[in-house]
Image (cartoon, helix red, strand yellow):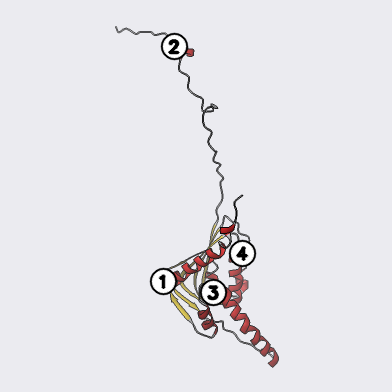
Amino acid sequence: MGLHTLRKAPDVGTLPRRKNVLDDSLPMYKPVYAQALQLNAYSMYLSGEVEDPEAYITWLNQINTAEPEDMLTIRINSYGGSVASAIQLSSALKNTPAIVHTSIEGDCCSAATMIFLAGDSMSVAPGARFLIHNYSGGIYGKGHEIHAQAAFDLKWSLDLLESTYEHFLSKEEIASVANGNDMWMDSEEVIMRCEILKEQKEKENGVGKENEQVI
């Protein structure tokens, strides 16, 4: 029969004391606070014709009520259409607090290019086609009304071209489009011009920052 040796348990007071993790002698580390954020991602498909403004009420409401944590992606395969709709949509996209990504997934022509350039970030699929040209329209009415609107439209269209395509087109190219010339681009050229546009926006946003003082 085997022997079992019984040993006296050591006195607790004689055991080496382990430092408490809250001991004042230990260095204090800065806490990290976690906050759960809900990211809502929305995709909107601009396909075929850019229709009249009433077709985009749901889109506009979603864009205008979006939160800073939201992500809006506009997927474009459109040959253009209503300039009025393009102006309203591009304005909403530029002013929403949400993150806006625009993606060309086929054709992006005429009015659709205005919506594409309203994105915070942009992507272009291989094989995409891109067309910028002057607006099309007509005038009907009494002689003096036709003359007045024609004079207004001339200035309005040039201002619209300059504000929409600044840094994406050169001043000479904008003047050429205003004079009736079409500008076709493939995906590689659009990507190159988007990079230039991004650099110019970053420069504008950084103007004066080098002179700021940190307090």
Q: Amino acid at mark 3?
A: Tyr
Whole-angstrom CA distance, mark 2 to mark 1, is: 79 Å
Q: Amino acid at mark 1?
A: Glu
Whole-angstrom CA distance, mark 2 to mark 3, is: 84 Å
First in sequence: mark 2 or mark 1? 2
At which x and y percent is residue 40? 55, 55
Q: Which residue is mark 3?
A: 165
User: Image height check: is 4 above or below 37?
Assistant: above
Q: Quadrant of residue 126?
A: bottom left
Q: Between residues 21 and 1, which one lies in front from this camera angle?
A: 21
Q: Which residue is mark 2?
A: 10
Alpha-carbon neighbours of circle 1 within 10 Å: few (<14), some, or many (≥20)?
A: some
Q: Which residue is mark 4?
A: 95
Whole-angstrom CA distance, mark 1 to mark 4, is: 28 Å
The residue sitting at 32% across, 7% down in the picture is 3
Label disc, if present, on residue 188 of the rendered structure: 1
Q: Residue furthest left?
A: 1
Q: Between residues 189 and 2, which one lies in front from this camera angle?
A: 189
Q: Secondary structure at mark 1?
A: helix
Residue 53 showing in the rendered view: yes
User: Image height check: is 62 above or below 10?
Assistant: below
